[in-house]
Amino acid sequence: MLTAPRRLLTLAVTALLLVATFGNPATAEPTPGANEDGGQNLTVRQALDKATAAYNDAKGRLDKSVADQASIGDQMATTQTRLTELQASAGTIAATAYRGRRVSLLTVMVGAENPDDMLHNMVTVEYMLQQEDKQLREVVATQKQLEQQRKDIDAAVANQQAQLKIMEANKKAAEDALRKAGGGADVSSGVPTGGKVTTNPVARNSDGSYPSEGCTINDPTTSGCISPRMLNAYNEARKAGFTHYTSCHRNGGGGDHPLGKACDFSANASTFVNARATGADKTYGDNLAAWAIANAKNLGVKYVIWYKRIWQPSSGWKSYGGDGTPAGDHYNHVHISMQ
């Protein structure tokens, strides 16, 4: 039988082991969002990811098409000016020929005083005919160019209308997914604002969409992998001064973490604190979320989750249905998902 001193010693050691094993509940390092990516919310999260990604690509195609339309419009103005000039010149040529003032081969032969003059005049006639033919051919080519530019404008407008329909459909799908997860309500006050653009645009496909990427680069925060755009966003956040503890790749579950397309940026400098961020930590999270939103288009951000709210390019800030924990409700970290 254990003596009283030994019993006390055993209890003390057991308590120390429990603390070492489970940590202080107020300062533990729970995996952020461990429940949000799996279980009954997995299908909802997948629907949200798919809809938001489709919206972003459609928006990229729309922006590219609008820029193309503006460029074609400028080209059309130049083409129309040139065509007007050519048509005026061609009209003068036709009028001259109609009035019989064009130098003809018969005029050259009759009016020449000697063979040398006749040869010179014949060369002159040939040159004039070539120049007139060249000018008339340029009129026809310029007319065709202008017509093609009009068709390109029509195609751009049709493309824009198609992309707008895709954007609207995926905006609705994303909002439906949020509502199914217990969120999606409009949020109008207290949201992070004022972020500054500090990044350059990432590479796009020729149509304006984002290239497909996989989990191909070593994750600097874990032993896993992340995508090139996620690594770029992580590095750009560091450059912008957001250097608190961060964790990106996570095995298992759903969502973007296993795909290497999401990072959790702790509000605390050194760990994930198992409590709501307050004071300086809350301010840090607000500033980081605002920065991610301001640079979303350049980086390829799909959505940002912070303090039980989610920001998407299609809808702005909405309420977010978490799991009731500081990590699951994103009270202790900013989640950034990438395209």
Image (cartoon, rainbow, N blue to C red):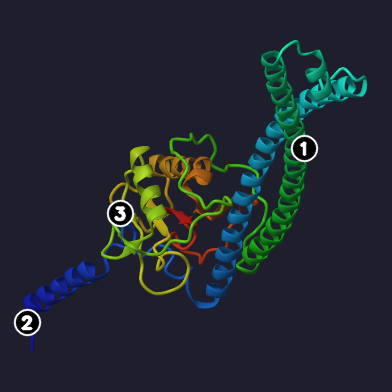
Location of the N terminus by quadrant is: bottom left
Secondary structure, mark 1, is helix
Q: Nearer the viewer, residue 7 or 180?
A: 180
Helix, strand or loop under label 2: loop
> In the picture, residue 84 is in which quadrant?
top right
Give the Cα distance between marks 2 and 1: 110 Å
Q: Residue 235, relative to residue 250: is it above or below? A: above
Q: Please identify the quarter of the rendering in which residue 30 is found.
A: bottom left
| Residue ID for mark 1 | 140
Q: Which residue is mark 2?
A: 3
Residue at the location (45% across, 39% down)?
200
| One can see residue 307 in this view | no
Which residue lies most toward the front here? 114
Closer to the N terminus: mark 3 or mark 1? 1
Q: Are marks 2 and 1 in contact (CB under 8 Å)?
A: no
Q: Which residue is at a point 67% across and 51% down the rendered structure image?
A: 186
Callout 3 crowding tier (Cα within 10 Å): few <14, some 14–19, many ≥20: some
Residue 143 or residue 14, whichever sits in front: 143
In depth, the one of 272 and 259 nearer the eye is: 259
Residue 288 in percent (x, y) is at 44, 43
Q: Which amino acid lies under the numbered mark 2 shown in the image of this protein?
A: Thr
Q: Amino acid at mark 1?
A: Val
Q: Is residue 195 visible?
A: yes
Residue 213: percent from left, percent from top:
43, 61
Residue 178 percent coordinates (x, y): 62, 63
The mark closer to the camera, 3 or 1, is 1
Residue 305 in percent (x, y) is at: 51, 54
Residue, disc 3: 271
User: Residue type at mark 3?
Assistant: Thr
